[in-house]
Amino acid sequence: VTTFGNGRVEVPGAPYSVMQGWYMAGPAEQYPNAGVDTKFHAYWLGDFPFDEREAMAFTSEMYTYFEAYFDHLDPAPEYRVFMRLLDTPPYGGGTALANSFMLSRGPLNDDDVYGESPKSTFVHELLHQWSGSLSGDAIGTNWFSEGLTTYFEYTLPFRAGHVSIDKYVEGLNIMSRDYYTTKARDWPISEIKKVGFGDDDIRHVPYKRGALYFADLDARLRHASDGKRGLHAFLSPVLKAREAGDVDLTTESWSQFVSDVLGGDELSLVQAVHTDGMTFFPAADSFGRCVAGERTVYERDGERFEGMRWVPVPDIAPDACFEDD
């Protein structure tokens, strides 16, 4: 089986196109069973420390939700998950290619919990085909590709009813604490680039401050429209234009789209936060009306860091957290 299909398939494009997919051979298990007509498929080798079918059933449900939530990919392409369990290092990790994702891992670590599947990883990688990217340097613009994906990774499973309000808030606080207490929270992207994949704590700073930026943008859009339009409604025509080739979506053109709606100089904010590394504090209602952000002080390794934490808002039901935009 491959990213491109099962058995003998034809891959359009230049020869290099065959490098943009995963290939698996052997006694692979699959979800769903053979013959089921669906756009989502999963294949794996090895006995994972979690229920593979339950994890893939969840991921398939999220695929269906994303397909309905986003309207700029019509129809949404098929998607395939590949998983392999290795006995010896290097174990690899998670990597997305064209309409597919490979999870490669080893045995349980001391801090792993048996039976707990990496659902957030599956959601994150699945979302990449909808969030896409900006034109330009991949790392220099990953505040968009990874930041928008991370924002949706936290918010959409909650909106879909797969995550409780307590787990939603817990996840937001873990993300915030990780961002505000890392030594690289105010590093420019030029310094983060130098680290590369050598330090996940540093590498993931653009993911987290990007997510906080998009959450704040959602709040700004809602405030400007008296609650009628948020990030979801704003993104739809922008992403449709990108997919149709009507716009080259760069940092500059993205910022202009935002400025056209909100006024102000969005490019200066984007450069200050994502290029220069300004520590970012989003609006208190950035993650919906049922959650409130407040300033706090975190401690890590004997140092104190100003940051934000999130608490549930009393008397607002989780299903009323976001407008139906």
Image (cartoon, rainbow, N blue to C red):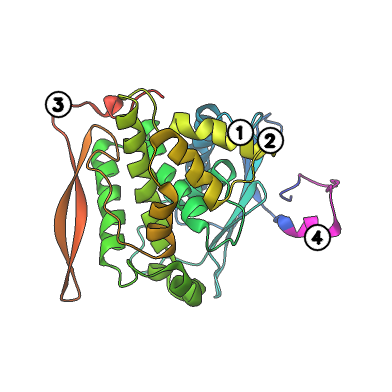
Q: Secondary structure at mark 1?
A: helix
Q: Earlier in the sequence, mark 4 or mark 3?
A: 4
Query: 119 left or right of 81?
Result: left
Which one is nearer the viewer's eye here, 88 or 16? Answer: 16
Please name the residue shown 56% across and 40% down the image.
Answer: 130
Say whether marks 2 and 1 touch (CB < 8 Å): yes
- Residue flagged by tag 3: what amino acid is it? Asp
Instruction: Answer yes or no: is residue 114 visible.
Output: no
- Residue flagged by tag 1: what amino acid is it? Lys
Marks 4 and 2: which is nearer the front? 2
For the stretch drawn in magenta, what is the main secondary structure?
A: loop
**Label 2 to label 1, Cα distance in Å?**
6 Å
Note whether 296 is above or below 166 in the view shown.
below
- Residue flagged by tag 2: what amino acid is it? Ala
**Label 4 to label 3, Cα distance in Å?**
55 Å
Note whether 92 is above or below 74 in the view shown.
below
Q: Earlier in the sequence, mark 4 or mark 1?
A: 4
Instruction: Answer yes or no: is residue 218 visible.
Output: yes
Give the labeled residue for mark 2.
244
Give the labeled residue for mark 3.
315
Give the labeled residue for mark 1.
240
Marks 4 and 1: which is nearer the front? 1
Q: Quadrant of residue 237?
A: top right
- Residue flagged by tag 4: what amino acid is it? Tyr
Give the labeled residue for mark 4.
16
Q: Residues within 10 Å of mark 3 (few under 14, many from 20)?
A: few
Q: Secondary structure at mark 4?
A: helix
Q: Which residues are magenta?
A: 5-19
Quadrant in the picture for the C terminus: top left
